[in-house]
């Protein structure tokens, strides 16, 4: 099962993996099995591309199965070898220290090697008023900003595990949380969905599209279109967890060079410009987004990370003359 | 306790679904049952249940001497897979593990009565005038072995002069020692010619011709 | 414990020699079969020439723990069977034969096997690697009769005997541990003074009472008369030679890419591996390589599968770009 992390900030992991989809979970499987103390920080089973995949029929060796089932199995396998998984969201990292530091919602994690496997379900600003009002009521992080909305009404845009978790966090502070799902149902785990639906402070709306975020110097409300019609919803803050299709690299804050299209650059061993920091999977902007390819890259990066940690500066074949 | 679980029974039923002709699994065992005699008998009976075209006949190695000699059986447990005619296909020892596939393939091929071999091979085999005995030594956990067994059995179907045995090395250690079997598959042709490993068809044919010249 | 395995199915009919395939995959291991799955799903007419053992090295592997998606682990042969079944389900034609030669200087490419000759617009070469030999006297003479590279095949014959395992990596240790189920003693002879195997395997090996280690040594000769009686080893540090009595020798010193057929036709690196870029392209347009035959570094099951998928997707793009080369 997904384990708890104790002694936050005191433990130093050999390997921290950001993102627990096929790439990250396979990296965790390989890392843990080879004896590395491995941690995976992941936003939730349905937060990524695999979670959206209905039926995967071409993963070799496995019959048709859902993306969530595939990822769940790989995670279980990784846990069986000792990998730890924590549900959290990475906000920023410091790659210049040794060990590196990874700031997430629940605290700071420290690790010697890092594998970035955050995928490409990220989005850039595209709602009218969104970019203008970032930091003035528009936020992407409840653990960061919930306290500013104590006793006020807020909106959450999204439908997956991450969105629901964040909404529940907000509900501890806000007077009311308007949960606006763009789809007709929630794409979150049954337990989380149940918790949200039953919460007295949560008001759920489905098939709701936000057309504009309104406000002068700060957020005053949303223009929302839903099957019930169009309306103005007055809120003091809006937390956005919608999904897009750009690489998730915002948390890097420029510490790693990005190429065209905001893509991370890596060598043939998936190492970035910073030794011991690797990136794999959809975050690399490959257009071949397949679970088995992501899994293969995760395995390669974990092996390369192991070699990095054990002092070899150059990868050698398994034998030499 | 059935030997074949439900999943395997289902798969086997599919494989045996459209047999073009009847197949007799003629099995030889004995009252004081030998190491795997009772399991081999059970296996034969379970397979026969999965198809109307397959019948299991169980004989006693000693008591049914006439039958034993008629089919040329010299050790047990033994299974002769016989269709419209007896092509000389035998399994000595239980065909478990990977050899289960060899048994199913033998049933399918015998029912059809046609060998799956290249034209070149068939031409060579058609010209054989002297008897050929092929023994393929295997173990149940050897993944390369079924290829060698199946190839030998196909040759037995192709020519009335050829008979071919799967011999499970663990159950017949004295034979394994006699033929110096230390790696499987090991094919012995007419006692004189040996092939290590699962060789391709053209090489087995060449070795067969070599054995006939000896 | 008796078990009954349904091995990968044999094809019902030999594929036609006429006509040109859009894609021929050389090799039926994890890389080749994953490529077949992807090509089949993209409806590319595909032929797979599997080589001597469908499933490749996977079919020889006792237990697989690290292929993602199988938290309980799975037998290598079972997994191989699943790959084959999946490839067939998606329409790949699989022929159980071995490649004897290719001609990459013409279009369509020519592929010769023991039984037939085929032509294809694109190729994916996924023939993997084979066990390296020691190259010492006695090795060839006793190969298959006391010298082996497959513990799962031949381990049984050494029940209560002593065997030597040559090597120090994961394969040598894992297979050595497997042999302790049969042999009364397994002597690991390694050229260095520490193992290259991963931690978890080293621990298991050192804890096993039937395993013993001879360090800093190489095998100079395999001795015997009618059967193997032992090996002569030389200590690289002291120069001393000695004889280790043994009934069998298992060689696990690494793998060699099966690239002899491509020498002079494809760019190979200095170790004989096919040179590919990140899109699995070789030095000849339309020819791709996947799996161990182009991977000296990682050689993992999932990595082979991943490169097979990439190669198949690249073939799809190539065929779309050059429609005049094929009929689609």
Image (cartoon, coloured by chain):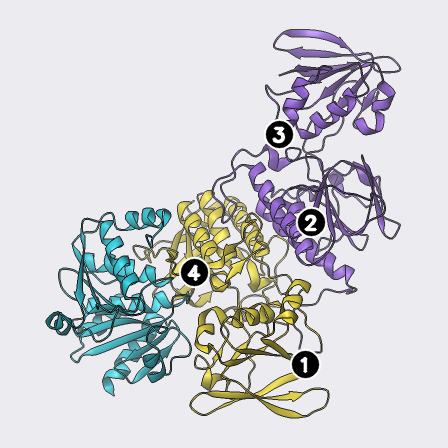
Chain colours: A purple, B cyan, C yellow
Q: Secondary structure at mark 1?
A: loop
Q: Is residue A271 visible?
A: yes
Residue C54: which disc?
4
- The answer to which quarter of the image holds residue A157 is top right
**Of residues A266 and A140, the one drawn nearer to the viewer in this rendering:** A140
In the rendering, which numbered label is found on residue A189? 3
Q: CA distance from mark 2 to mark 3?
A: 22 Å
Mark 4: few/some/many CA within 10 Å (<14, 14-19, 20+): many
- Asked if the residue at tag 3 contacts the one at tag 1, i.e. Cβ–Cβ closer than 8 Å, the answer is no
Of labels 4 and 2, the one closer to you: 2
Q: Looking at the image, which residue is at 39% across and 58% down?
A: C3
| Image depth: mark 1 or mark 4 in front | 1
Q: Which one is nearer the viewer's eye here, C286 or C80?
A: C80
Pointer 2 residue: A83
The residue where tag 1 is placed is C215
Q: Quadrant of the C terminus of chain B?
A: bottom left
Q: Residue at x 85, y 52 (%)?
A: A99
In the image, C241: left or right of B47?
Answer: right
Mark 2–mark 1 Cα distance, whole angstroms, equals: 33 Å
Q: Chain of mark 2?
A: A
| Relative height, residue C163 to residue C280 (above, below) | below
Give the structural element (helix, strand or loop) at label 3.
loop
Q: Secondary structure at mark 4?
A: loop
């Amino acid at each position: 099962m997904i384990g708890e992390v104790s002694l936050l900030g005191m433990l130093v992991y050999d390997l921290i993996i950001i993102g627990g989809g096929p790439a990250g979970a396979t990296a965790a499987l390989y890392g843990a099995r080879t004896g590395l103390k491995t941690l995976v920080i992941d936003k939730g089973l349905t937060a990524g591309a695999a979670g959206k995949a209905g039926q995967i029929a071409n993963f070799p060796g496995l019959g048709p199965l859902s993306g969530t089932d595939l990822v769940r199995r790989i995670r279980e396998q990784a846990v069986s070898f000792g990998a730890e998984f924590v549900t959290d969201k990475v906000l920023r990292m410091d790659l210049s220290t040794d060990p590196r530091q990874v700031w997430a919602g629940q605290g700071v994690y420290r690790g010697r090697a890092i594998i970035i496997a955050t995928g490409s379900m990220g989005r850039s600003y595209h709602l009218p008023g969104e970019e203008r009002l970032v930091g003035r009521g528009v936020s992407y992080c409840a653990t960061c900003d919930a306290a500013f909305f104590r006793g006020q009404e807020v909106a959450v845009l999204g439908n997956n595990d991450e969105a629901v978790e964040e909404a529940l966090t907000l509900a501890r502070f806000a007077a009311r949380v308007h949960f606006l799902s763009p789809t007709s149902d929630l794409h979150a785990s049954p337990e989380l969905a149940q918790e949200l639906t039953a919460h007295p402070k949560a008001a759920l709306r489905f098939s709701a599209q936000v057309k504009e975020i309104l406000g002068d110097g700060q957020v005053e409300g949303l223009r929302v279109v839903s099957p019930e019609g169009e309306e103005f919803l007055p809120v003091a803050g809006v937390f956005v967890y919608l999904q897009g299709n750009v690489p998730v690299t915002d948390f890097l804050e420029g510490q790693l060079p990005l190429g065209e299209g905001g893509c991370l650059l890596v060598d043939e061993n998936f190492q970035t410009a910073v030794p011991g920091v690797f990136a794999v999977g959809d975050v690399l902007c490959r257009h071949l987004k397949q679970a088995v390819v992501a899994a293969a890259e995760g395995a390669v990066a974990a092996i390369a990370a192991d070699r990095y940690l054990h002092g070899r500066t150059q990868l050698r074949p398994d034998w030499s003359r | 306790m059935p030997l074949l679980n439900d999943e395997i029974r289902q798969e086997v039923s599919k494989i045996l679904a459209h047999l073009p002709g009847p197949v007799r699994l003629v099995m030889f065992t004995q009252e004081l049952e030998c190491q795997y005699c009772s399991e081999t008998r059970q296996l034969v009976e379970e397979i026969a249940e999965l198809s109307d075209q397959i019948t299991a006949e169980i004989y006693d190695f000693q008591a049914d001497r006439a039958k034993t000699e008629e089919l040329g059986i010299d050790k047990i447990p033994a299974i002769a897979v016989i269709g419209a005619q007896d092509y000389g296909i035998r399994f000595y020892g239980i065909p478990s593990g990977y050899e289960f596939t060899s048994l199913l393939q033998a049933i399918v091929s015998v029912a059809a009565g046609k060998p799956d071999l290249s034209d070149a091979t068939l031409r060579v085999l058609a010209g054989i005038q002297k008897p050929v005995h092929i023994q393929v030594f295997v173990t149940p956990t050897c993944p390369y072995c079924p290829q060698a067994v199946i190839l030998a059995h196909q040759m037995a179907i192709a020519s009335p002069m050829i008979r071919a045995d799967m011999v499970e090395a663990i159950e017949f250690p004295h034979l394994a020692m006699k033929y110096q079997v230390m790696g499987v598959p090991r094919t012995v042709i007419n006692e004189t010619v040996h092939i290590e490993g699962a060789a391709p068809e053209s090489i087995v044919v060449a070795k067969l011709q070599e054995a006939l010249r000896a | 414990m008796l078990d009954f395995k349904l091995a990968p199915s044999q094809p019902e009919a030999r594929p036609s020699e006429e006509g040109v395939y859009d894609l021929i995959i050389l090799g039926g291991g994890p890389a080749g079969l994953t490529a077949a799955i992807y090509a089949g799903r993209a409806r590319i007419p595909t032929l797979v020439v599997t080589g001597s053992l469908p499933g490749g090295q996977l079919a020889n592997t006792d237990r697989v723990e690290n292929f993602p998606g199988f938290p309980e682990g799975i037998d290598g042969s079972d997994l191989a069977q699943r790959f084959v079944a999946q490839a067939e389900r998606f329409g790949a034609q699989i022929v159980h034969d071995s490649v004897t030669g290719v001609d990459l200087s013409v279009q369509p490419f020519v592929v010769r096997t023991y039984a037939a000759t085929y032509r294809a617009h694109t190729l994916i070469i996924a023939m993997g690697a084979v066990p390296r030999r020691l190259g010492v006297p006695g090795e060839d003479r006793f190969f298959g009769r006391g010298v082996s590279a497959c513990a799962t095949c031949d381990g049984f014959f050494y029940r209560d005997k002593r065997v030597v395992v040559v090597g120090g990596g994961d394969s040598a240790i894992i297979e050595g541990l497997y042999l302790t189920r049969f042999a009364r003693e397994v002597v690991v002879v390694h050229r260095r003074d520490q193992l290259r195997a991963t931690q978890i395997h080293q621990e298991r090996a050192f804890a096993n009472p039937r395993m013993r280690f001879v360090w800093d040594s190489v095998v100079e000769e395999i001795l015997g008369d009618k059967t193997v009686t032992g090996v002569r080893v030389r200590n690289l540090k002291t120069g001393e030679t000695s004889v280790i009595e043994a009934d069998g020798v298992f060689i696990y010193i690494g793998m060699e890419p099966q690239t002899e057929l491509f020498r002079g036709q494809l760019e190979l690196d200095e170790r004989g591996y096919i040179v590919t870029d990140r899109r699995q392209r070789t030095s000849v347009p339309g020819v791709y390589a996947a799996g161990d035959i182009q991977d000296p570094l990682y050689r993992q099951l999932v990595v082979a599968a991943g490169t097979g998928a990439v190669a198949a997707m690249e073939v799809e793009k190539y065929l779309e770009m050059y429609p005049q080369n094929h009929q689609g």
